[in-house]
Amino acid sequence: MQNLAPKGEWQMAAIIGMKDEQVEQICKEVKLGFVVPANYNSVGQVVVSGEKNAVLEAEQIAKDMGAKKVMLLKTTGPFHTEKLQEASKALRKELENVTINKFQRKVVKNLDGEFYTDNDNVKDILAKHIISPVRFSKTLEKMIIYGIDTFIEIGPGKTLTGFLKRIPTDKELKVYNVNNIVNLNETIESLNMYK
């Protein structure tokens, strides 16, 4: 995505403390250029992506409407927007070299928060991810509704775990973070207790 981002000044910003619909409306009200919701991370957190001046205008509108916080992100492209058509096409072409087998387990698409089906064209869907908003909150909600109660975040930080904790549920969730060999061994040991 980075290599095929269009030229221009691009920005992304996380808008915190507003409903999805409010952020969508803010983007429609912006007059200084292109900006759209790009990541629906969790309840009350949506990232917008677009031209720098448009994102800055969206930031001001959000603050005026009572957003708890708006954080500009350190990015240089209009990620997860229609502006990345070339990257989407390049990924789709590259995916022709990949064999995707039938899923042995349920997998939720970040594209719409629904399970993949046998009729889905996985390669088309993966390519579409580049130009479509990430629906991570819907993905988490779907998993919880489906009965998933154990989540493992692999990688540095606890950002995704934080998103999970904002999803309303009365279910008790087990959450693990793995970012080194010690965490990995602790997680494996904890999970073995539930067998």
Image (cartoon, rainbow, N blue to C red):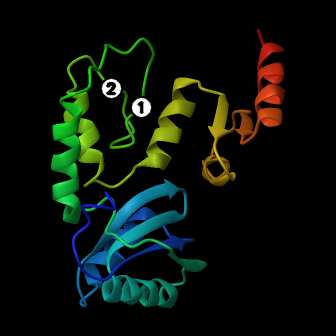
Check the picture and name the quadrant holding the N terminus: bottom left
Most foreground residue, 146 or 40 = 40
Residue at left 24%, top 61%?
A: 4
Left or right: 101, with 156 as reference point: left
Left or right: 5, with 70 as reference point: left
Helix, strand or loop at label 1? It is: loop
Q: Which residue is mark 2?
A: 116
Sort mark 1 into few (<14), some (14-19) or many (20+) by Cα contacts within 10 Å. some
Sort mark 2 into few (<14), some (14-19) or many (20+) by Cα contacts within 10 Å. some
Residue at left 46%, top 40%?
A: 139
Which three-letter amino acid code belongs to the residue tagged 1? Val
Helix, strand or loop at label 2? It is: loop
* Vertical comparison of 190 with 174: above or below: above
What x and y, as percent, mark residue 89?
Answer: 15, 48
**How far is disc 1 from disc 2 in space, using C-alphas?**
6 Å
Q: Quadrant of residue 151?
A: top right
Residue at left 82%, top 23%?
A: 190
Left or right: 9, with 148 as reference point: left
Q: Earlier in the sequence, mark 1 or mark 2?
A: 1
Q: Which residue is mark 1?
A: 108
* Vertical comparison of 41 with 172: above or below: below
* Vertical comparison of 109 with 8: above or below: above
* Vertical comparison of 15 with 63: above or below: above
Evaluate if marks 1 and 2 touch, with contact meaning CB atoms under 8 Å apart.
yes
Which three-letter amino acid code belongs to the residue tagged 2? Tyr
What x and y, as percent, mark residue 112?
Answer: 33, 42
Q: How many numbered marks are there?
A: 2
Residue at left 44%, top 57%?
A: 40
Q: Quadrant of residue 22?
A: bottom left
What x and y, as percent, mark residue 116?
Answer: 33, 26
